[in-house]
Each structure stands twice: as structure tokens, then as C-alpha cells.
Image (cartoon, helix red, strand yellow):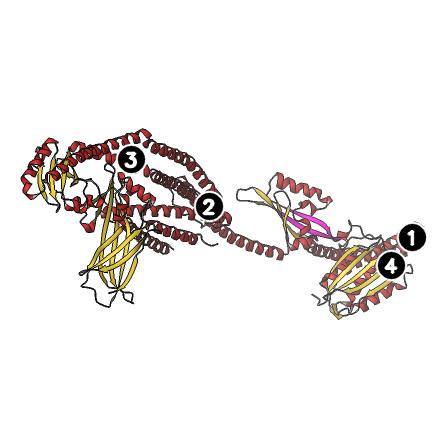
Amino acid sequence: MDRKRRKREVIIIIGVVALISVLSYITVRAFGSGSQIPPANMALMFILMNINMLLLITLFFLIFRNVIKLYHERRNRVAGSKLRTKLIAAFIGLTLLPTVVLFFFSIQFITTSIEFWFKIPIEQALENSLEVGQNLYKLVEENNTFFLDKAAYQVDSRDLLAPKNRSELGNYTQVVQRAFNLNAVEFYNSNFKRLTQSVSENLKNHTFEPVDADALQKGMADSKKTWSVSEHMAGGEIIRNISAIPYGAQGPDIDGFVVISIILPPDLEKNLGSISKGFEEYQQMKMLKRPIRISYYITLSIVSLLVVFCAIWFGMYLSRNITVPIMELAEGTRRVAEGDLSYRIDVIADDEIKTLVDSFNKMTRDLRFNRKELEFSAKKLYEQNIEIEERRRYMEIVLNNVSTGVISLDSHGLITTINDSAERMLNISAEDVINKSYKHLLKEEDNALIQEIRDRFWEKREESLIKSVNMTIQGKSRSFKVTFNALKDDNGRQIGLVMVFDDMTEIEKAQRMAAWREVARRIAHEVKNPLTPISLSAQRLKRKYKSAIDDPVFDECIQTIAEHTELIRNLVNEFSTFAKFPTANPTPCELPPIVKESVALYEDGYPNIEFHTQIQDNIPMLRLDRQQIKQSLINLIDNAISSIKTKGQITVEVSCNARRDKVYLAVADTGEGISDKDKPFLFEPDFTTKKTGMGLGLAIVSTIVSDHNGRIWAADNPPRGARFVVELPVNGT
Amino acid sequence: MKKPDGVILKILLVAACLLLALSSPVMAKEVKIADFAVTNNRDDLLVFFSVKGAFTREMVEAIQNGIPTTFSYFVRLEEDKILWFKKKIAAKSFTHTIKYNNMKDEYVIKRSWDADKAITTKSFEQAKSLMAEIKSFRLTDLDPLEKEHRYIIRAKAELDKVTLPFKLHYILFFTALWDFETSWHSFKFKY
């Protein structure tokens, strides 16, 4: 780009130099080389003139080009063109007004000055002076003509031109010269040869050349009586009046010539020359008045144009200096706004614009540096975030895969995270509880616990708390060991709470079962032994004293002892059965036949109860202890029958899930149902709603189901009654 | 968008041409060489011609206001060949100068070929003819000329210089007041 420009500049310079040379040559030739000034100086003058002209044209070209460029820019709505136009217009306006005023004032001044030169009195005075000079010459000529006439007449009448009268002619010449006080008197023959001459004293020392033949012949050609020639000598101007002899003769009649000379003194000659020159110059000036005025006008116009052009050019230059950085700044701002911080303004300036540009460049540099730092920080942050996210996900995976439920709360007690185990344990969905208070997890009856948590953690700022919490989840009582741990940051500020739920239901149940079995075994062992002596003793008393004591009270007491002993025995047997409950021995078998057999046992015995069986087709084979399953089914049907006071329905359903990996056995009744309060304790030993029995039926059922790796739960059977569901795995695990 | 530089360059070119045109002398169409004749005496080739239309109103005014005026004459003799190259045999230039003396009301004419001898006349007509008429001008002797050869004589006249008072002729370069230059007048003859 720069090379191209340099090349173009070189071409332009060569072109300009060539043009100047050509123009100078042409001008010198046109104006001629015979000038009074030396050719070298003249050539220099023309070169300068042409340079001026070319400079003017170049300036005009620059301005015109810039104006056209500006017009194009304005038309294409190039940024900055409006401001440039305003600045240039302002400059033109500021320059044009004084220039125009000065121009017209100068024009007026020149006009009046030139007019002043040609005042009438000056011209009149010059004309009068010239007339005086002319009259002087005329007077000299008239006097000389008179003397010539007289002298010619005398010479002709006395025939003094004849060679024989030569001395007489000489005398006469002296007489005429002295008598008429002439400076010189000469006589020539018809062959233009001077015959005699007489000169005054002041011409004695000067060579006095004879009049040449041409001068003598001139009058002959003009057919004049007298004519004159004038010459310049050291002593002044010599006027030589000539006439033919005889006076006024023409052609062949001419015998000779008489020449009378009068010398005008040098001062007079000089003054006459000055008058002549002055009048000449005045006339020439008068003639050149208009061209001079025009040339002055042109010069003035060129100067004015030069001033205006310079102002326009300066305006353009200044406007460019102002607008270019502004446009660069605007462009830079736009580019920076688009996010290009590598943009740099390269404007050469040494004023406030430079400060502005430097500030802008510094700003972009700082922004670039800051952005790099930010990018670096963001990258680091992103990496850290990824790491944190990975850790969080890892933690989440860990949390979601641990069997314990984990719920975290923030400092306001709002739930922030909940893992799958907690969702499953508490039968809640994360979406429903996230960002809600932990109170939503607990029921109204747990107000004491809510209060305790608030007191301990949000008031007393304690570290941890372990509580056993019983909850009814989906109608089933669940027992949880909840560990509350305060979350604190590095500064010890509490930022939340972590609740860890351990489902203790099954463990507690197993523990209770084991304890109950131990109790049952001991009771069976300890209570059964005294029963036999009590029963036997009662029978002995009856046998021994039946005849002796004829008192109904005695018989009643003995009967009561026997009945209650039997009752206790039954209880003990029941305990014994529970304690000695055999472990399941599952074998592959089908569930539907067991169900049908069990229901068949009751169908005829309870006319007020309708028994229904709903068995899905294609129930897969299960590994079951047939006897135990039948026992548990009988227990469930017994409970259902017990809950129906008057009339009702008992429905036994067998179904499997879509994946065919679980089989559901449900016993639903339309009895009194189970209150939510009782639901947690249904499968506990010693829980019963019946008048008789030890409450071991459902505990036994639960044990059997557990032994088959299944689950049992109780639910409501809308519109009324209860529904016990047994879930059994198909593969037995 | 077309760059305006091309247009500007054209304008500059036109301006330069105008400047060139202005720099060259004004061609006065009415000024021409006429009455051209060639003859010879025993030894020399003689040329006769006159300049018509040189004395414009402005020039007459200038002369009568005492401005010394010089006419330059250029005469060339070349062999007339068909080819472009013409052999120059002789080339002469001379001047006629006129100056009016207002004090004596007479015109002084000096001619360079006449050893610049002053000829005075009170008649302006005579002065004009002395200035514009060339009679029996010795162009060359007859030695270089060959019989039966064709020759061409070219003549041109122009106003040589005008001397204005106060050196005004140096600043009035834009006003060609009475400047003239004839074109080359050609006259062919067979010797």
C-alpha cells in the first residue's frame, strides 16, 4: 500500500517537473528572447510563474477532489461527513466574509487610485509642455527656413556654387553663419558633396560630419521646400534644416543644398526629452489603464481565491484531523461494544485528541487484560465448578445409593437437597419439598420435635441430635432414627442442618419379634409348668370334696379355675406356637390353588359375608412354604371376618405386576377398617382389637411373609374397610 | 462507488491544456503574409512579401503613444522533397522597429538588414509600409541552388516585443494586447 503510494507520488512529482519545464519553454518562446532582461532570469521568472500556476491548480485539484469526496461521503452517509461539512462550511464562511469585503474594498481602491493617476490637469499640463516643445522646434525650423530661403536665393542669384566662386562661397558661408548667429552653415553641390562650412565657436572642437546623401535626398523624395534631420552630439541636439538651391527646386533643377544647423543646449534637449517621454508614458499608461486594472483585478482575484482555497484546504485538514480520530473512536467504541478488544486507534496527533486516543487505547488494553484475567478466572472457576459438580454428583450418587435418607436444610430451615432413599422412606417427591420448610416432613403431632429442633439448632446452636421418630407412611408405621447435624462453615456460622434418616422399622420389628419369642418361650416354659398342678389340684379338690361340699360356690370356683387354667393353657400354647414358629421351607408351587382352598374353608360358615376371589391369569410359580402361606391367609381372612360386624364382603385378589417379578395377594374387607393411629402397630405382637387373643395373628403373618422375602402392609379399602396386601417376589429373593 | 480521483485527474488535465494554450501566443487570424514573390538578380535570390492586418487599432494606438514596436521576420529556404526530411539551404531572420517621436511628430523606423539606419517620416502610412513590406530581401546567393530543382521558401512574421513603461510588459503576461504571429507561409518554385 505504502509502496504504491510512494510510486504514485514519484510519478506525480516527475509529471509536475516535466510540465513546469514544458510550460516554461513554451512561455519563454512565446514571449520572445529579445527582452531586455537576461534569458536566464526570464526563464527563472517563467518557471516561478508556472510553479505558481501549477500550485494554484494543485490546490484547486486538492480542494475539488476533497469536496467531491465529501459530497460522495455525504451521499453515502459515511460517518463523520456531516461534521466535516459543518467545519468546512464554517471555515469558508469565516474566510469568505473578510475576503470578500477586502476584495471589493481593494477593487474599489485600485479603481479610484488608477482614476486618480489620470486626472485632467496632469494631462493638460503634459499636453501644454509637449506643445511648448513642438513650438520650439517649429520656431527653430521657421527661423531656419527663413534663413535658408535667404541664403539659397543669394547663392543661386550670385551663382556661388560655381567652382570658380568657391572662395566667395566660403566667405558668404561665414557671413551667413555670423550674421544670423547660426551654429553651422554648410553648402553642398548636387552630388551631395559638402563645398563649404562655417561653424560657431562652440562647435570648433567637435567633429562636424557632413549630412549623408540619404538625408539630402529625403526632401527630394518628399517634394518639400525644406526638411530637417537631427542628431545628438556631446554639446546637445543638433537640428539641421536643409533646402535645395534654388529654394524649393525639385529633381533635376537642384543645383545644390544649403544646410543650416542649430544646436539645442543639453539641458534644453534633456528637458524636451523628459517632456516627450513623460507625455509618452502618460499616454501609454492611459492606454494601458484598462489592462492594468484587469491585471490587478486578476492578481487580486487569484490572491483572494488562494486565500479562500487555503482556508478551505485548512478547514478540510483541520476537519479531517478532528473527524478522523472521532470516527476512529466511534468505530473503536462500536468494535469494543461488539467485543473486539484488540482494536487499536493509530492516529497521529499531539493535542487533546491524542490524550483521548491514548486513553481509549489504554482502556481497550486494560479491558483486554481484565478480560484475559476474567477468562482465566472463569476458566479456573469453570474447572472448579466442574470439579465441584463432579464431587456434588459423586456425593449425590453416593447419597442416592446409600440406604439412609439424607435431607439437608439451609440456614432458614428450608430443604435444599433430599436423596432417593429419603424420598423412598418418607414417600415424598423432591419437587414437592425442595425449598420448603422441614416442618412439611413432620406431622402435626410432631410439634414437640419441631420445637425441639428449632430450640436446639436455631436457638442454642447445638451440634447434633439423635431422635427416634415414628411416622405413618402410606398407612404403614415406620420407625426412623433421625440424626440431626448442624452444618457450619469455616467461620463456625451455621449454614444449615443435615437430617440423616435410618429406617429402624424392620430392625425394631425383628428385635421385638426376638424379644417376644423369648418372652413367649419363657412364658410357655414358666407358666405352662404350674398350670398342670393347678388343673390337677382343682380336679382333686372337686373329686375329694364334691360329695362333702354341696355348695354351688365351690363347684363354680372349681369350674372357673378349670376354665381359666384351660384358657391360660391355650394362651400358653399360642405363645408356644409363636415362640417355636418354624422357619419357612419354600418349594415351587402355585398360589391360586392355596387361595381357593383357604377361601373354601369359610364360604359356607359365614352366610352374612360374601367371599370373592379375583385371580389374574398367568400368575407365575412362586417358591412358597405352602402350609405357612395358607396359615397366614387364614389369619388375614380371620381378621377380616372379625372386622365385619353384620354383613359384608371379603375379596381375595391375586395379581402380578407388569414385569412379572412380584405377585400381590390382597385381602380386602368392608369391615370397620383400621384407624391411622393403629396402623403402625398392626404387625406387632400383643396388638389386638379383638376381645380375645393375644394379638399374635398379624405378627405371625408378618413373620411368614418376611421369611418369604416379601412385604405386608395395611391400607384403607375405600369406601370402607381395610385392605392387607402381601407382596411376594417371584424368584423368592 | 467510483473514486472521484479519476474525474479530478481529467479536470486537471484539461486545466493543464488550458494553461498550455494560454501560454502559447494568441493566433491572430487576420494577420497573414501576402504578396509573396521570389526573383533573382545576377547573384542573389530576392524575396518580396508583406504582412497584412498587423496594424490593428490597438497597435496603432500603441505606436502613436510612443511604444517602440518590433516586428520579427523569419525566412527559410528548403529543398522541396517528397520525403518528410527537407534540407535547409538558408534561414534568415531580421527585425523592423518603429518608434514615434511625439515632440517632432515623426516616426523613426530601423531595419536590421539595413544596419539599423534610422528612417524618419511624418507619414504613418509610409511608416507602416516600411514596417510591413519586405522588398528585394537578399535571402541567399544562387550558388547552393541547382537548376530544375524544386525549392520551398517559408516565411513567418511575429510581433517580437513591446516595451511598456514601468516594465509593465512583465506583469501583463495575461493580456495579449496586440500580439500577433502569422503562420508559416510557404512558396514553392522551380529554379
Label 4 sits on what residue type? Gln
Residue that carries the numbered disc 4 in the rendered image: A649
Compute the Cα span from label 2 to label 1: 127 Å
Looking at the rendering, the stretch of residues picked out in magenta corresponds to A463-485
Dot 1 lies on which element? helix
Mark with earlier residue (2, 4): 2
Chain at numbered mark 1: A
Chain at numbered mark 2: A
Q: Are marks 1 and 4 in contact (CB under 8 Å)?
A: no
Compute the Cα span from label 2 to label 4: 94 Å
Mark carried by residue A282: 3
**Mark 2 vs mark 3: in front:** 3
Chain at numbered mark 3: A
Residues at discs 1 and 4 both on one chain: yes
Compute the Cα span from label 3 to label 1: 189 Å
Dot 2 lies on which element? helix
**Mark 2 vs mark 1: in front:** 2
A663 with respect to A719 (left or right):
left
Dot 4 lies on which element? strand
Compute the Cα span from label 1 to label 4: 44 Å
Which quadrant, please, contains the N terminus of chain A? bottom left
Question: Which residue lies at the image location 86% right of the left edge and 58% below the top edge?
Answer: A641
A173 with respect to A453 (left or right):
left
Q: Are marks 2 and 3 in contact (CB under 8 Å)?
A: no
Nearest the viewer among A145 and A304 is A145
Residue that carries the numbered disc 2 in the rendered image: A327
- Give the number of callouts: 4
**Mark 2 vs mark 4: in front:** 2
Q: Position of residue A203 (x, y in %)?
A: 9, 35
Residue that carries the numbered disc 1 in the rendered image: A555
Question: Which residue lies at the image location 56% right of the left edge and 41% below the top edge?
Answer: A493
